[in-house]
Image (cartoon, coloured by chain):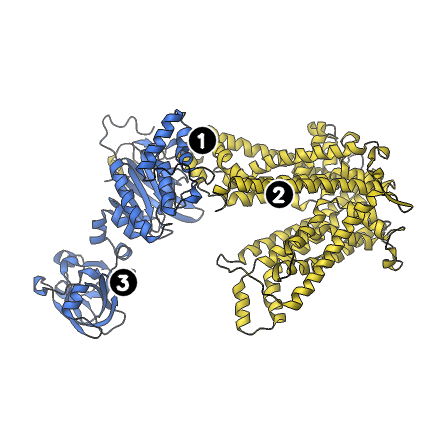
Amino acid sequence: MARKSKTKSPPKRAFLEIRDVSKKFGDFTALTDITLDIVEGELICFLGPSGCGKTTLLRAIAGLDYQTTGRIYQKGRDISDAPPADRDFGIVFQSYALFPNMTVAKNIAYGLVNRRMARKAVADRVQELLELVGLPGSDDKFPAALSGGQQQRVALARALATSPGMLLLDEPLSALDAKVREQLRHELKDLQRSLGITTVMVTHDQEEALSMADRIVVMSDGRIAQVGTPMEIYRNPVNAYVADFIGSMNFLRGRMGAGGQVKVGRLKIALPEGAAKQFAKGDDVVVCIRPEDVAVRNLERFKAKKFTMTINDVEFLGSFCRVTLDVDGDKDAELVADFSINLMRDFNLVRGGKLDVALPGRRLQVFRDEGQGGEES
Amino acid sequence: MSAADIPGATGLEPPGSPALRRLRALKAESWIMLAGILAIFAALLAFLALPLYALLKKSVEDDKGAFVGLINFQEYFASAGLVTSIGNSLTIAFLTMVISCTLAFTFAYGLTRTCMPFKRMFRALATIPILAPSLLPAISLIYLFGNQGVIKGLLFGESIYGPIGIMIAMVFYIFPHVMMIMVTALSTTDARLYEAADALGTRPMRVFFTITIPGAIYGIVSAMVVAFTLTITDFGVPKVIGGQYNVLATDIYKQVVGQQNFSMGAVVGLVLLIPAVFSFLIDRHVQKKQVALLSARAVPFHPKPHKMRDTGLLIFCILMSVFLIGILGMAAYASFVTFWPYDLSLSLVNYDFDRVDPNGWSSFYNSLKMAGFTAVIGVTIIFLGAYMVEKGQNFPKLRGLFHMLAIVPMAVPGLVLGLAYVFFFSRPENPLSVFYSTMAILVVCTIVHFYTVSHLTMLTALKQIDKEFESVSSSLKVPFYRTMFRVHVPICLPAISEVMMYLFVNAMTTVSAVVFLYSPDTKLAAITVLNLDDVGDTAEAAAMSMVIVATSVTVRVAHGLLMRGMNARHSAWRQR
């Protein structure tokens, strides 16, 4: 209603537009000024710890809980105040919410029967969906007779049955055990890609988000911390919070010295030019590097300085080892590095031994030290 | 990309408050929901809140309806006879509470914490009194200890007509209620506490007082409160066996039915309401605390055999069962004896009710009809009400208010409710007075009287259903009522059947609320028992009680079979 007379040919609008959405529960603010565009056909993940507001945002999109202020547009239509039945989405819940007293086929057909479709057409559609989710022949089973993964597929089929324009997934995999979860991750992503359905997924599992999402929205305390592709978020976190939340990260606290160098204890770490410019001498900063980015081989390749460190601990983790290095004889400042088994063997790394490492400049992230961001996670 | 670049997506709020816009966007189904909540809310208002208000109003009016302030109360407290009743009621309630709770705790301890045999049988036996009207134990005691009683000598000259008789009959009548609360309290325990105590070498007595009692304390308090309230508000027992010993409950009846002194009846009703409301509040408070006591990770307790303890409690449970069966058996036997105590031959002559009472058997058919209507209409309303409270999506304040109102009946004794109905519905200017002295008012009164327990049972069943079903349903554009019928009703069938049985049995046995409301055409079986006993036809009263017991047992057995059948048919999805 509000937009009809503004312009004749609006520029291409995003599939779903979220504008300044806030949500308050009494005195508690669950969402603060969320503005976000969701592109047609993408799989976008809302990622964050519990209580960050990701589920609240999903429920606002679905109309299950209304936002306190702000607008939501789907394909240009203002759906901010529309009840869920007036919006165009299918949803899968963490609990799957399958009707226990109905067979798989009846569960899937639940939304179809209401549309006065012919019985034959409904049955055909159910078969089609069962094949789509890889459960042909399970029509007459009751949900209780299915495994968690199978129930999840049925819930997905039910959500897709009415061919909605958008799919909402609320922690869809978190009730499953690790093996099944990994397998379903791929299937879900494949299915989403082949159907080309715009999908919003809420998860607290960063691995899940990194492996499935086209874009990730990292949330904290009811605000968006960062939006980007998994690679962007992993490689270039905008702050220490995101860096800490996604993947493992070393946090080295230090102070800016002269010539773009940071002093961390006795170490002087050279920053790349771009990063160094943002800080003045004497600023407290945090230098971040991922454990897999600590370099050992071909150190000449990097212009960075070599540091000789003592190995405090070696933790065997199957395909690789996590090595804890002494930075300054100080327990609080340790550097964690992930080394392949191969490298471990080549360099004969054992507890108490010495090792030369470099911290490659282009792998470093530097943030102002605001006291946040913990130890390595 | 900034919001301002995109026309129309400026984030500006359209005019009107969000709540109003959302109300306008509501679909037909939400209006159905609203209409449903309002309808049930209005019904509870009309059939609970307004009558209670009428009672309150009556207590400050004279017989002509003029406002007289607290004069009625002054008059009440000036009358020595009436004030004695307060003392009597409190004494009886207190002693009955102590005795019944001690017995029920010991019985429940035997059922939950020992390895004695026949636990299931004992448990089933202990619930027998629920199936009988409270008049039955009193009648039975008259046969056992009355002027011509079989074991009168056991009382050593004391009379059964009075406090002793009231207390024994009350202990029988409230035993199942108290026992079941005790069983629940003793079942919710964590075996790890006992293992820890064992590992530390704690003596059994100390374990009992430091772990068992504290763990069950909330249940014990709750049971005490229930025992106290049931005793102080019961009317049938003191009416039959109280003799000259006056209590509050019989005072109300005498004031209203005997002397037609309605204002004084209202005052006594309010006096009776005080302990009931008070114990209700204690119970609510205690129950809230109980929940937190057991964590999800608690390990269930399995008792180990202990010869002395097991034997001792087995003997106790046998004695208790003998008491319960003895009372029931005496009534049954007396009902078949041709002419007590002169002709002890057995016959069905006492069951020929039409011989002694103009309503005779028809009062039994009335009871069946009333109980049937109460069960069917009651369960429908109670289910819909609980559904709206638990699963409704909109109007949270209205739903909360309704839930509060639904809890109130628990705090209102049946006598008080019945009296309130008299004041509210008998006034000709009330459009609802067409109900007065019909079957409908008996049904409505009984549903309201037993609303709370049924409502809570239904709520518990609904709470166990995934709360996202409504969300799924609306995302699939299926209206809520369709999902309610196709999903919630089938899943709740066990609770629905349970509530129906509860309503039916209580409607068969209740006296207190309906005693003010029946007309000659709608006289009920339990009231016939009362009248028969009043005019001295004790044997016929016993016979009619037995007919009621037999009906309740039949319904209970039918319910059991139904549940078994349902479990078998739905085993594919029911046993998760």
Q: Which chain is assigned blue? A: A
Q: What x and y, as percent, mark residue B164?
A: 82, 55
In front: B339, or B427? Answer: B339
Q: Is residue B56 visible?
A: no
Identify the subunit bearing mark 2: B
Residue at 86% in and 40% down: B537
Relative to the observer, which residue lies in front, A26 or B366? B366
Q: Is label 3 in a helix, a strand or a loop? A: loop
Numbered tag placed on residue A376 in the rendering:
3
Instruction: Categorize mark 3 by other alpha carbons within 10 Å: few (<14), some (14-19), many (20+).
Output: some
For label 2, the SS is: helix
Q: CA distance from mark 3 to mark 1?
A: 50 Å
**The furthest residue to the front:** B345
Q: Quadrant of the N terminus of chain A?
A: top left
Q: Is residue B353 above or below residue B316?
A: above
What x and y, as percent, mark residue A31? 36, 46
Q: Is residue A138 left or right of residue A37?
A: right
- Which residue is disc 2 drawn over? B560
The residue labelled by disc 1 is B26
Distance (Cα) linking label 3 and label 2: 61 Å
The first of marks 1 and 2 along the sequence is 1
- Do the residues marked 1 and 2 share a common chain? yes
Q: Which chain is yellow?
A: B
